[in-house]
Image (cartoon, rainbow, N blue to C red):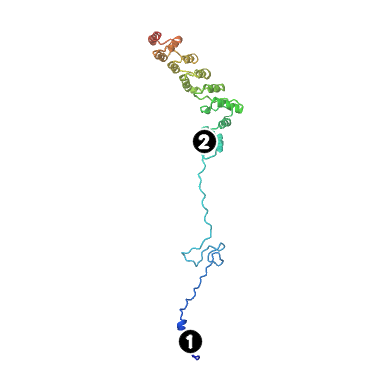
Amino acid sequence: MGFVNPGRSSTRLNKTFGKRYNNRPPSPPPRKRRKTLSPYSPSSSYPTPSSSTTPSPNLSRHQTPLSTASPPPRPLPTRDPPTLQTLPPELLQRIFLLSKNPRLPATTLRLTRSLSAPVLKHEYIRIHYGSHIPPELLLRRFFTAQFLRTHESRYQSTLTFAPDAFLPPHRYSIEVLRLLLLRGATLSAGDADEWTAVLREGVHEADLEFVRALLEEAGVRPDEECLGLAIEKGWVEGMEVLAERGGVGLGGRGIWEKALEVGKDGRGAELEFLLERGCPPAALLGRVWEVINGSRR
């Protein structure tokens, strides 16, 4: 073991032993930490609401400043405009009462359901017609004898026809026809042919009461076609009413020929009715005699 020479300096020793024990690689220099700024910091580079959004002249042309403006509002959902179909029933009823359009309930199925209450029909007549019977509503299905009585009882008044209103030609029930005639219904001379056609319908249905009402109360004039239809149906009572109340002549050739056709089938009551009240044309006397003899055998 040797001794260190005290005369040797410490610097020399450090150089001698440092090569063996202190020869470590130098550590890298410390890295500088980048200072990050909060966007909410006053010194932040982001614009604040109080700062101006005018772009800085130092910004390049490819850079845009951050904008703090609120986004545009979303457009409201569009709705289809309301139509007559989408209105509530209460408003539809009000429109109907003020529209003066009796055909409005029959426009669509929804309007029919919303405007089918009988009270609406009563109010409609009261508002637009007062105490007069509306001729254009008489052909509606709802206008029955019961409806007419209910209306008069509801408003404590009797409906009558206006002076310039006429009863439109129609196959009314006998009850409605008589109620209308009692309330001043008159027939227009211009509708004579239409009323004769209605009389034919009554003869075809053998509705004696309806035929009597048209002839005696309404003053409808029958024609030979009405009498021929009664002969064809074998309706002797109708023939009698048409001849006595309607004043149909019994001398027409067509009437006798129709009675001869019916008599060939074994029905001679119609021909006998004509013989009791009239005389056949001379050209048909032979055929009349044959049919009468054939029916008596």
Q: Which residue carries the number 1 mark?
A: 13
Element class at badge 1:
helix
Q: Nearer the viewer, mark 1 or mark 2?
A: 1
Tell me whether circle 1 and circle 2 mark residues in contact (CB < 8 Å): no
Q: SS class of the residue under badge 2?
A: helix
Residue at the (46%, 82%) spot, across then down: 21
Q: Residue furthest bottom?
A: 7
Determine which of the numbered discs, if any, sits on residue 111 in the image.
2
Q: Is residue 185 visible?
A: no
Which label's residue is closer to the chain start, 1 or 2? 1
Answer with left or right where residue 121 lies relative to residue 290.
right
Please, what is the three-letter code of the amino acid marked with disc 1?
Leu
As drawn, the label of residue 240 is none
- Picture coordinates of residue 130 (x, y %)? 59, 29
Q: Position of residue 17 (x, y in %)?
A: 47, 84
> Is residue 46 positioned above or below 273 on the image?
below
* Image location (x, y in percent) of residue 276: 45, 9
Q: Residue furthest front?
A: 1
In the image, 107 versus 88, the foreground residue is: 88
Establish if 270 lies above or below 54.
above
On the image, the x and y values in percent for residue 252 come to 42, 14
Is residue 122 shown above or below 251? below
